[in-house]
Amino acid sequence: MLYPTCAFPHCTRASAAADLDHITPWQTGPHGQPTGGATDSHNLAPLCRLHHRAKTHGGWTYTRLTTAEYLWTSPHGYQFHVTTHGTTDITHNTHPKTPGHDRSDHENACATGRSATDTHRDSDGADPPGRPTPRP
């Protein structure tokens, strides 16, 4: 297997049951013609359902660097280099931290199965303004 786990930063879920995500989204034009990313091995990556939704609806973006290497950018500007050997935070304090939005929140979300957005809720349980929580 080329990529044994979900390709999202810090996720260790097996890719055998993962969704195949279009890195460049598949789209169709006004007349139904394909205009987006192709459905081929160069444009697909394994993401568990939770992280597929975080990418599609949560503001995460990524690029494939090599066959098994990705560069992810979080909605808060953090960047992560992901390989089959693990994840490296390559942000190096180049972006100011937003209180309550650090890498440990995301790591905890992966470990518990909660969405990363759920860990960023206010103490009253409300979603952050303009960011509805995706529900699996």
Image (spheres, helix red, strand yellow):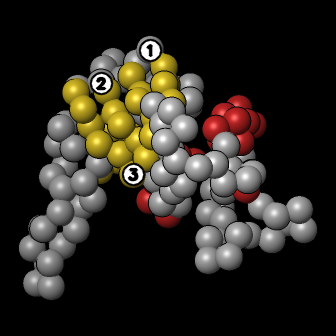
- Callout 2: few (<14), some (14-19), or many (20+) C-alpha neighbours within 10 Å? some
Q: Are marks 2 and 1 in contact (CB under 8 Å)?
A: no
Q: Are marks 3 and 1 in contact (CB under 8 Å)?
A: no
**Does residue 101 sit above or below 32 in this rendering?**
above
At horizontal 29% and vertical 43% (from top left) the residue drawn is 63
At horizontal 18% and vertical 73% (from top left) the residue drawn is 28
Q: Amino acid at mark 1?
A: His
At horizontal 29% and vertical 48% (from top left) the residue drawn is 23
The residue at which mark 1 appears reads as: 85
At horizontal 64% and vertical 71% (from top left) the residue drawn is 132
Which image quarter is the N terminus in? top left
- 101 horizontally vs 58: left or right: right
Q: Which mark is residue 68?
A: 2
Question: What is the tally of numbered marks visible in this picture?
Answer: 3
Q: Amino acid at mark 2?
A: Ala
Q: Secondary structure at mark 2?
A: loop
Q: Which mark is residue 61?
A: 3
**Does residue 3 sit above or below 123 in this rendering?**
above
Q: Secondary structure at mark 1?
A: loop
Q: Which mark is residue 94?
A: none
Residues under labels 3 and 1: Cα distance? 20 Å
Would residue 83 be visible to someone looking at this image?
A: yes
Q: Secondary structure at mark 3?
A: strand
